[in-house]
Image (cartoon, grey):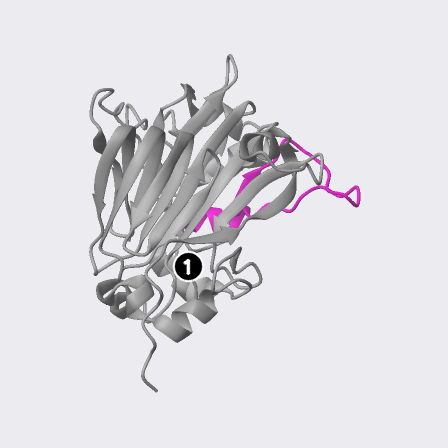
Amino acid sequence: MKRKIIESSPIKFTPYLKSVIWGGTKICRYKGIVQTDSNIGESWEISAVPGHESVVADGPYRGMRIIELIERFGPDLLGQKVFDRYKGKFPLLVKLIDANDKLSVQVHPDDNLARQRHDSFGKSEMWYIIEAEEGAKIYSGLNRAMTPEEYVKMVETDTIEEALAAHDSHPGDVFFVPAGRVHSIGGGNLLAEIQESSDITYRIYDYNRLDANGNLRELHTEQAKDAIDFTFRNDFKSAQPDPDAADYIIAECEHFRVNRLLLDGEMTLENSDESFTILMCLKGNAVIAYDDGTMSIKAGETVLIPAVLTSVSLKGKGTLLTVRS
């Protein structure tokens, strides 16, 4: 059956707000929406993870799930290269994260291990710090050389946290966290997360916290051991973005490229027909102008620009991220 070409306009989705033990109240305040729970730790802005597929918020496709859009429009939405490479699957998951308390110490499997164990994508990710309270930390990588056997012993003795590389966190900081890197987000951080489309996490240590039923949260010590990259480096923090560059690449890997835009006036955003573009507004606001109209976007909002829409203009003032696969 021949696909109907998707209407050439950006698409907004209804965010999925996830309540977690370490969540807080920053996300709803940041997005300007009603607080529905006291422990909202994540806002899944665009997701195709089974069971949590994003739903179109308004416009002609209101109520349709992202996987239905892909089934209907295929390469017009994803881009031909992305459609072919990922066999019609949406390859990314975009979130906002509010760490009111520190997250568990964890690691994610790479593509090969995730495919073998879970028939899933792996999980490489990156973080852009939006807000950071005084003293907030990001934990990325190990601060010493370590063998798998030493890792297991430190988990068993509740000392693994001592082996984490700690980094001061400031707005505008960038951290690329490839699959296999042990990490955690410290309390007091509000950040944007771009990752592969996967919800697989191996929890290594969780400070002996209890779940809603009063039980210790499950750890995945052995699974994590096989996933961890034990390579030691002197610095796991990404280079600071050029403060004066209007369009600057802040993270790039085989699955995604993320640019930070500093908008002050008007600029043209070229979109390749090989990939969709995700536009996240982190600060300020903008108007997106395209062939058939305009759409506004403000801090805390995310839109998907279909690959078929190869050029849009942005007008306003603020900080935005563009994400392409």
Magenta residue check for 206:
yes
Q: Please state which of residues 116 and 59 is positioned toward the viewer in this rendering.
A: 59
x, y percent for residue 239: 25, 25
**Image side of residue 236 versus residue 219, left or right:** left
Q: Please state which of residues 105 and 248 is positioned toward the viewer in this rendering.
A: 248
Position of residue 136 relative to residue 100, above or below, is above
User: Dividing the picture into quarters, in which one does residue 146 lie?
Assistant: top left
Q: Which residues are magenta?
A: 202-227
Which residue is situated farthest in the right direction here?
Answer: 213
Which residue is situated farthest in the top direction here?
Answer: 134
Q: Amino acid at mark 1?
A: Ala
Which residue is situated farthest in the bottom direction here?
Answer: 1
User: Dividing the picture into quarters, in which one does residue 176 lie?
Assistant: top left
User: Dividing the picture into quarters, in which one does residue 251 lie?
Assistant: top left
Position of residue 168 relative to residue 194, above or below, is above
x, y percent for residue 2: 31, 83
Which residue is drawn at the image coordinates 37% and 26% (left, top)? 144
Which residue is drawn at the image coordinates 40% and 46% (left, top)? 295
Magenta residue check for 203:
yes
